[in-house]
Image (spheres, rainbow, N blue to C red):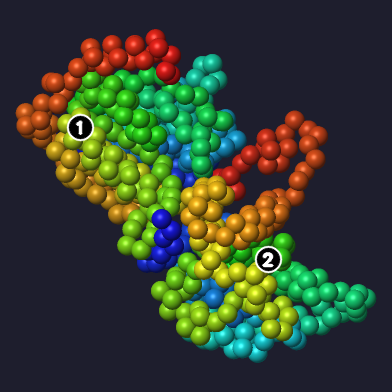
Amino acid sequence: MSRSTIALAQMNPALGDLERNLALHEKTAEEAIGRGAGLLVFPELSLTGYFLKDIVSSVALPLTSPILGRLRDLSRRIDLIIGLVEESPEHLFYNAALYLSMGEIRHVHRKVYLPTYGIFDEQRYLTEGSRIRTFQADIGRSAILICEDMWHPSAAGVASLDGMEILISPSASPGRGGLEEGRFFANARAWETINRAYAQLFTCYVLYINRVGYEDGACFWGGSEVIAPSGEPVAKAEYLSEQLLVAEIDPVEIRRARTANPLLRDERPDVTLRELERIQREGVR
Amino acid sequence: MIDLSLNCALVEQILTGFIANEVRKTGFGRVVLGLSGGVDSALSAYLGAKALGAENVLALLMPYRTSSPESREHAELVVKQLGIQSDLIEITPMVDAYFERFPEADQVRRGNKMARERMTILFDHSAKLQALVLGTSNKTELLLGYGTLYGDMASAINPLGDLYKTQARQLARHMGIPEVIVSKAPSGDLWVGQTDEAELGFTYEEVDRVLYLMVDRRCEIPELIAAGFDERFVRAVLAKVRSSQYKRRLPLIAKISARTIDRDFRYPRDWGK
């Protein structure tokens, strides 16, 4: 597999306005195509905005929606990862991300871990996903973990054992705390630690796409980034402003990292599974 | 453990971004605020001017006859420094006309009336000029309930509401607000000689430290006492926070229907923006 140019859309969606956001996706895609990207990744809930509350049911889309048809058409020209509220045939609402390529929906990830604490209230409005799967993208074997999914190392660990070479994390992270002299948001610093650690521990690329803008006073901090399997940053977007971050990823870097640090080779899923079964049997969780 | 210092450049960027973003979402391009001569309203004016341009900020000076002349001088200094629009609207005739019927009214009632008189003038200008009312209440005042409900606590958007008083002062210095305004004793200027700290019974430096631990760090009372704070002081602060909770919420609505505003009818304010 050869090098790929990818683009991360650090954008500011309108809250609860599908048409406006769809137009924003199409405009951004034109720019990404112009800059030679083969994949364009949007943040979490990019079609709807984040703090939706009771708007959820009004902006939820079944996978057969004509709005997604427009994005499927667009995916004949550039691969897309977009965020939406997906309505299942059973009328359950999921915080989901879709991988669209060659006019088809080729992967759906439904957010597994729905934060419901502090400023978050997702379990009130949304249904938990229950699958963590890798999928074959043009850029390599990939997994999508949406925002809070990244705060559960077991999720990334499962994806890694499932063949993950590229970890894609669409997020909508509001900045919180830690703005003491000389410092940035505390949770942003934590994110940057996680992204570097995961890249290094799972010897994979990490594509972190965070949005910007304000919703009811909460400020999304941006700072999207691409981290190489060595743990080194490849590209980093500005904090707090809209930007299309374009970067190259090179599968040779995955090989190089895994040759130097054969952590994946030395994983012991048998031990992990046995111990998990024991823990479950003993009723600790 | 207690660090109330601020990355001022970054906080300024976040707050000016907040003002520009939230004002434009409403379809407005301007803000109006009451300028008292104190550090908080000066800071809101500076942030507003930086966010939207001086030409899009209107400051209203609304003195009562007992207001300190120094307050007015300081407000005029801010207007001059920023080059913002301003107007002087005396509230004495309206307030005095009302209290002619209630001559026995105490300082608190008179102070509240003044604050609410100013609020009605600000919201009238909001409609007149298509300008959002920019808030000036800081986190310390909001938590202690040290403000007039539907008076100075009323606004459309408030850039200062998550900054403690001592943090607002730091940001004010960073933004170049004249030291004479930043370092004077804070006062509601609702009666002659009033100062916040004499009325509250403690200094902002002291109370900000307790509030930071109590609110931001979720410390329980025994932890605060173990950290060396006087128990009576801590309990007095908590009592103020608890007894003023109603000021930080919408009025209670008696539930009748299947869907009641703010209970099970929950929409973000930026709905569709």
* Image position, residue A193 (x, y; %): 27, 43
| Tags 1 and 2 both on a single chain | no
Q: Which circle marks residue A80 in the picture?
A: none
Marks 2 and 1: in contact by CB < 8 Å?
no
Circle 1: residue type: Leu
* Of the pair B169 and A128, the residue shown nearer to us: B169
Kindly identify which residue carries mark 2.
Answer: B147
Q: Could you tell me which chain the residue with mark 2 belongs to?
A: B
Q: Measure the alpha-carbon separation of dots 1 and 2.
A: 52 Å
Q: Is residue A143 above or below residue A274?
A: below
SS type, badge 2 = loop
* Of the pair A31 and A176, the residue shown nearer to us: A176
* Of the pair A76 and B6, the residue shown nearer to us: B6
User: Badge 2: few (under 14), some or many (20 or more) residues near its Cα, within 10 Å?
Assistant: many
Q: Do we see residue B147 in this rendering?
A: yes
Left or right of A23 in this view: B202: right
SS type, badge 1 = helix
Q: Residue at x 61, y 41 (%)?
A: B267
* Image position, residue A39 (x, y; %): 25, 35
Q: Residue at x 18, y 20 (%)?
A: A267
* Image position, residue B47 (x, y; %): 48, 70
Left or right of B32 in this view: B8: left
Q: Is residue A18 above or below residue B45?
A: above
Kindly identify which residue carries mark 1.
Answer: A201
User: Badge 1: few (under 14), some or many (20 or more) residues near its Cα, within 10 Å?
Assistant: some
Q: Residue at x 33, y 25 (%)?
A: A155
Say which quarter of the image contains residue B50. bottom left
How many tags in the picture? 2
Circle 2: residue type: Gly
Instruction: Tell me the quarter of the image containing the N terminus of chain A.
Output: top left
